[in-house]
Image (cartoon, grey):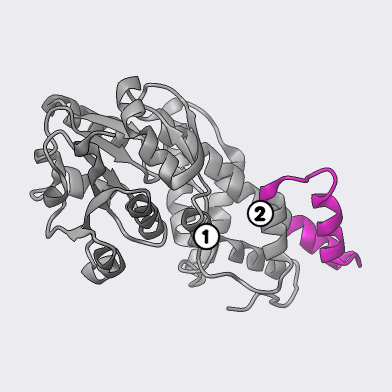
Amino acid sequence: MSQTDKSIGFIGLGAMGLPMARNLIKAGYQLRVYNRTKSKADELIALGAEFADTPAGVAAPDGIVVTMVANDAALAEIVTGKAGFGHTLGPNGIHLSMSTISPQLARSIADVHDRTGAAYVAAPVSGRPDAAAAQQLTMWVSGAQAAQERVAPMIAAMGRGSSDVGTDPAAGHIAKLAANILVMNTVEILSEVLVFAEQSGLDPQVFAEAITNTLFAAPIFKTYSGILTSGNIPNPGFKLSLALKDINLALDAGEMAGVTLPIVSILRDRLLTGVAKGRGDLDLTVMQQSVREDAGLSPTITH
């Protein structure tokens, strides 16, 4: 690791970004951090991080900046806005973009960096905040091979593994959107079959344990069936409002690619209904409540 790469910028200290940044510090990196709410950086400052007053302030010439922000608008502002780090990163710098954003924006920002000699590496993450804290995230990585190799140690410090999905700067974000479709569809279909079991006289917890130990013995089915049969809603690991944002990104990307996504459209309607009912800040698993309501069942999820 070069001396330059030991000191990096990090922008976005939300539920996912904070534990990711913490793990980088534990791995020996010196961080300059920026977040709109400065108090969210207090823990990292206590661990030795330096707080920058603007996004531009986190970037060192030829350095690396990690971003983990909520949406396209936030990323565009911190890169190309008046105080954006796109103006200060410069030749040989790398933007390691770990947010779930549109493929179109990824290509646009990659072009911005290319004009200044910097590189864009996509590495959006799959996993909930507890996985981020435990260094168990999965990353979908794309970008120039040399740049990928340079940021590989940082990616390793934040996750359990990564998949190289190509050199197109948008490829990682396309893979992440596809993965999120699978996650949301898993929550929806599990909700449906568990409600079906309950209404038909079968104990849903008994069924969930049986099916996740046989035909569907995969971590994602075990995790979400456990949550959905617990009778409780967890602290937001993936807010319903952010899930709706991601589904809309996927539908837009599908339209641009000329691909119909009928199941994704159904998921969008389910998410939109939940947000309209005031559940946008709750965990994605609150989707189950709409399924129960459609079946005439009373709430079982509390928060």
Q: Is residue 121 above or below residue 54?
A: above
Nearer to me, 35 or 77: 35
Residue 84 % position (x, y) = 13, 47
For badge 1, the amino acid type reads: Asp
**Magenta stretch, residue numbers:** 191-220
Question: Which image quarter holds the N terminus?
Answer: top left
Q: Which residue is mark 2?
A: 188
Residue 130, label in figure = 1
Residue drawn where x is 43% and y is 47% of the image: 158
Q: Position of residue 14 (x, y in %)?
A: 36, 61
Q: Residue at x 11, y 37 (%)?
A: 61
Q: Is residue 218 magenta?
A: yes
Query: What secondary structure is marked by label 2?
Result: helix
Position of residue 219 in the picture relative to residue 127 (left or right): right
Q: Amino acid at mark 2?
A: Glu
Please report whichever mark, 2 or 1, sits nearer to the chain's N-terminal start: 1
Side (left or right) of 206 relative to 193: right
**Residue at position x 91%, y 67% in the image:** 201
Q: Residues within 10 Å of mark 2 (few under 14, many from 20)?
A: many
What residue is rendered at 42% in x and 44% in y?
157
Q: Is residue 249 visible?
A: no
